[in-house]
């Protein structure tokens, strides 16, 4: 029937109107104009670098390659002219700044000051007074070359007091820039994946991420339970509990490093020894494993990694604490009153009433914190520098790119980081509630 | 009187509080006075249990001020007796002006904690409800105390170390006693040296410039963007409002290599301008997200009325939307300020010259064996103080903002 109806009135357009009204078009244009600045800066600083990172990961780039090859000029009049009509030499000394890359088809132009007369021009040079143009050909990596021109000095030059250096030579040349050349290699990825330590780095990253996230979440849950009921001084404590999160990471990381120092002057170790908890100072951030015996079982306890995880939990529990506290305070009080009437004990109330209500925020927090902990670089870098079995993927990016100076390998690790992250983000978006506020 | 579960629990409470407060007051006394203390935790637990036994045996209505006061006086005597008049592991007469107040503080804290725990309970058997309630009170109290110590200890050490000297720290790392009789310039020597010899004045100014300009740029970009997403209809709007936060999940470490490469070639790397470009790019998405959520909550009718009366969109935003959204603007500004002030990675990677260091970068430069550690801690305090002051001043805004829609990590 529907199709018959449509055939009966062929003149009327079906479905949505084909065009958009002028008003709607204007609104649309306005919206795009307002979003344009945001779009540009995000494109320039986030999206393009992301693509560039992929590009670099397929290139053999080292830190030193970032300074492209260019000619360095040194211009001198030798010997210093004393009298008019003296013949001296004008020397251009050209050096290739790069040790590896050649400069090709190098030409330079320079303007010759008035009062200097060039008598003989070497091959490749021509003079269109006052501009001198010289072609130098190719200059290999690290090569230097002299161009010597005999000049006659006139009185006008001596009177003017002009130095030859005042006009800087302008160079034209071609050089290969590793960053933009169309040569690709998978050597970076091969290097990353074949390295022995890669899998241990991956394992450490997962431990750090999972336990750091759980630690921060559980501490936040506890803190929220403590501060849920009102008492005098609660506001002060709530402010205090947020300190670790608000303070700059450098400040708190160095405070922990000094606090846990195993050498002389380490406060925490001195405390432990004073209380008789240990005889030897514990190197919290420097020891990979310490042996612990539990009922005769020898266990290797990953000391530095645990300390770093403890720091992570300490620094980020305030965030989950705030979210959980806000959720708990929005729970209806009459629910608990009813449970009280029915004789539910406090633990039962927590287990059967509070926890199910908090499950939503807890899972969202878990996924968010998981991604953020996975992304974290500063904390471990400042605490241990990735030593003693605490090297995570993000620290590895830095180590490869800037400590070993292999930008390509660093970018390859960064690609691995991003790929894993994409997986986690997809997970997060499938699990997150689909409300739009 | 029957001895039941409540009594046993009360004794447990007493032992736990007695021991814990002894540990903490002992440590505090050690840090404040520099005395070498071995807190007798076991004996203190015993004394605490004794006090709890007395308290629980006292009928609830008799536990008035006088009863608590008497207990507070008797408890230290008990402890002193069982430890042979060495309540902190050394003769009481030695530095008594320090030990006696600490002992009284221990007793007062024990009795106060016990009173709070046992309030409303009397000896005898009880239902599961009461037992759980008592246990939870104990656990909550314990957690409260331990949490506070756990959170505050690094900050305490930070501040105290900055006021000491390297030699005295190495000699006794537990001695944080401050001699207030010394001259002001001696006490704050590290700070004075930081500002006179280590250019911290410049760093402070650089940090302030970068943070404030990041806030301004972020607002200038995010306000129109958020308004468009919240109010205007255009294709891709739903996608945008959902995916803008994804940008915020991109780790900085992935961006640092390409940005380092490109900024090096552009000459932007070793400059504050470079930071002022990078920081807003990382904060705009979250600012936009927070603001558009707030804009949506504002009544659209007001703006429509403005449009009817002949205002342009820009005028509507400036005269109607923004004044209504002031709390959200404050939240976003504070939040962005905090991120920019605390940022470490890009400052560390980009800045080479001393005169353009931000505080983050400047404090890292203090982390060498040639610089004494009180300077490092003084630098940390200088970096922390402004952001903490701003935070405490505007805590209300920041807390609501953090929970309203942000996800910073």
Image (spheres, rainbow, N blue to C red):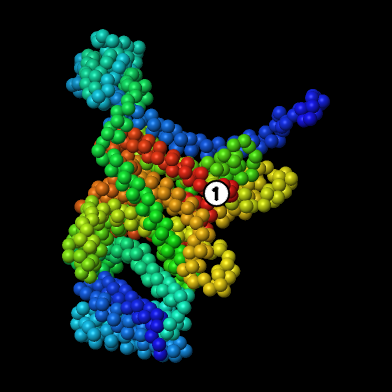
Question: What is the quadrant of residue B282 in the picture?
Answer: top left
Q: Where does label 1 land, which residue? A: A433
Residue at x 33%, y 54% (from the top left corner): A309
Report the front residue among B205 and B132: B132
Residue B116 % position (x, y): 43, 79
Quadrant containing the N terminus of chain B is: bottom left
Badge 1 crowding class, 10 Å Cα cut-off, few under 14, some 14 to 19, many 20 or more, is few
Instruction: Report the side of B114 relative to B290 (left or right).
Output: left
Report the front residue among B186 and B302: B302
Picture layout, residue A298 above or below residue A67: below
Q: Can residue B309 be seen in this view?
A: yes
Residue at x 68%, y 49% (from the top left corner): B300
Picture layout, residue B239 above or below residue A129: below
Instruction: Report the side of B370 relative to B59 (left or right).
Output: left
Report the front residue among B279 and B266: B279
Picture layout, residue B259 above or below residue A80: below
Instruction: Report the side of A337 relative to B12 (left or right).
Output: right
Instruction: Report the side of A222 relative to B352 (left or right).
Output: right
Residue A123 % position (x, y): 26, 9
Residue A67 % position (x, y): 31, 30
Chain letter of the residue beneath label 1 in the structure image: A
Report the front residue among B21 and B213: B21
Residue at x 34%, y 24% (from the top left corner): A184
Picture layout, residue A3 above or below residue B192: above
Q: Is residue B193 visible?
A: no
């Amino acid at each position: 029937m529907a199709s018959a109806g449509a055939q009966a009135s062929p003149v009327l357009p079906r479905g949505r109107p084909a065009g958009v009204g002028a008003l709607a078009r204007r609104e649309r244009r306005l919206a795009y104009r307002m979003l344009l600045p945001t779009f540009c800066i995000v494109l320039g600083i986030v999206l393009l670098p992301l693509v560039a990172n992929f590009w670099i990961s397929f290139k053999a780039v080292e830190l030193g390659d970032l300074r492209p090859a260019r000619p360095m000029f040194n211009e001198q009049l030798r010997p210093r002219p004393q009298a008019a009509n003296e013949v001296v030499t004008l020397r251009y000394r050209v050096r290739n700044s790069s040790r590896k890359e050649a400069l090709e088809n190098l030409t330079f132009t320079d303007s010759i000051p008035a009062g200097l007369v060039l008598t003989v021009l070497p091959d490749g040079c021509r003079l269109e007074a006052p501009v001198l143009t010289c072609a130098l050909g190719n200059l290999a990596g690290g090569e230097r070359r002299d161009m010597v021109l005999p000049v006659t000095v006139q009185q006008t030059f001596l009177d003017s007091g002009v130095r030859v250096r005042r006009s800087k030579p302008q160079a034209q040349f071609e050089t290969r820039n590793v960053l933009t050349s169309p040569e690709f290699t998978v050597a970076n990825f091969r290097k990353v994946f074949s390295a022995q330590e890669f899998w241990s780095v991956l394992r450490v990253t997962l431990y750090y991420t999972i336990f750091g996230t759980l630690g921060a979440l559980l501490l936040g849950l506890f803190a929220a339970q403590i501060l849920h009921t009102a008492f005098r001084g609660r506001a002060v404590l709530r402010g205090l509990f947020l300190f670790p999160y608000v303070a700059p990471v450098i400040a708190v990381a160095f405070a922990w490093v000094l606090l846990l120092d195993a050498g002389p002057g380490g406060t925490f170790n001195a405390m432990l020894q004073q209380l008789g908890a240990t005889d030897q100072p514990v190197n919290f951030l420097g020891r990979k494993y310490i042996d612990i015996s539990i009922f005769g079982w020898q266990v290797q306890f990953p000391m530095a990694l645990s300390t770093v995880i403890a720091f992570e939990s300490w620094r980020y529990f305030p965030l989950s604490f705030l979210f959980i506290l806000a959720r708990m305070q929005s729970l209806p009080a009459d629910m608990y009153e009813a449970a009280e009437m029915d004789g539910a004990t406090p633990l039962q109330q927590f287990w059967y009433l509070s926890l199910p209500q908090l499950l939503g925020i807890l899972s969202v927090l878990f996924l968010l914190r998981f991604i953020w902990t996975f992304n974290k670089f500063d904390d471990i870098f400042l605490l241990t520098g990735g030593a003693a079995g605490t090297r995570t993927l993000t620290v590895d990016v830095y180590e490869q790119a800037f400590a070993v100076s292999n930008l390509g390998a660093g970018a390859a690790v960064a690609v691995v980081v991003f790929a894993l992250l994409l997986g986690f983000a997809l997970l997060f978006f499938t699990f997150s509630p689909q409300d739009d506020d | 009187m029957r001895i039941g579960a409540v009594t046993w629990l009360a004794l447990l409470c007493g032992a736990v509080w007695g021991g814990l407060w002894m540990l903490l007051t002992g440590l505090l006394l050690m840090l404040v006075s520099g005395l070498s203390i071995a807190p007798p935790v076991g004996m203190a637990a015993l004394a605490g249990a004794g006090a709890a036994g007395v308290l629980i045996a006292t009928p609830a209505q008799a536990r008035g001020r006088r009863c608590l006061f008497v207990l507070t006086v008797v408890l230290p005597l008990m402890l002193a007796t069982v430890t042979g008049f060495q309540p902190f592991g050394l003769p009481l007469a030695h530095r008594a002006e320090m030990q006696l107040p600490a002992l009284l503080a221990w007793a007062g804290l024990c009795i106060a904690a016990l009173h709070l725990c046992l309030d409303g309970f009397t000896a005898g058997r009880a239902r599961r409800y009461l037992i759980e309630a008592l246990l939870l009170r104990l656990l909550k109290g314990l957690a409260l105390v331990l949490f506070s110590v756990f959170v505050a200890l690094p900050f305490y050490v930070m501040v105290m170390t900055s006021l000491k000297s390297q030699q005295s720290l190495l000699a006794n790392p537990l001695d944080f006693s401050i001699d207030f009789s010394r001259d002001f310039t001696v006490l704050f020597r590290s700070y004075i040296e930081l500002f006179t010899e280590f250019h911290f004045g410049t760093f402070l100014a650089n940090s302030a410039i970068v943070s404030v300009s990041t806030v301004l740029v972020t607002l200038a970009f995010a306000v129109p963007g958020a308004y468009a997403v919240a109010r205007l209809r255009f294709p891709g709007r739903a996608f945008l409002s959902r995916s803008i936060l994804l940008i915020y999940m991109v780790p900085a470490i992935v961006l640092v290599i390409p940005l380092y490469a490109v900024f090096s070639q552009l000459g932007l790397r070793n400059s504050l301008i470079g930071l002022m470009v990078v920081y807003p790019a990382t904060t705009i998405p979250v600012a936009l997200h927070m603001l558009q959520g707030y804009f949506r909550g504002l009544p659209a009718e007001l703006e429509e009325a403005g449009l009817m009366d002949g205002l342009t969109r820009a005028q509507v935003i400036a005269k109607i939307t923004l004044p209504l959204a002031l709390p959200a603007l404050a939240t976003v500004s504070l939040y962005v300020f905090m991120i920019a002030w605390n940022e470490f990675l890009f400052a560390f990677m980009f800045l080479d010259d001393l005169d353009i260091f931000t505080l983050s970068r400047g404090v890292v430069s203090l982390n060498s064996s040639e610089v004494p550690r009180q300077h490092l801690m003084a630098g940390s305090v200088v970096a922390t103080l402004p952001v903490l002051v701003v935070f405490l001043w505007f805590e209300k805004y920041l807390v609501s903002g953090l929970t309203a829609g942000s996800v910073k990590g």
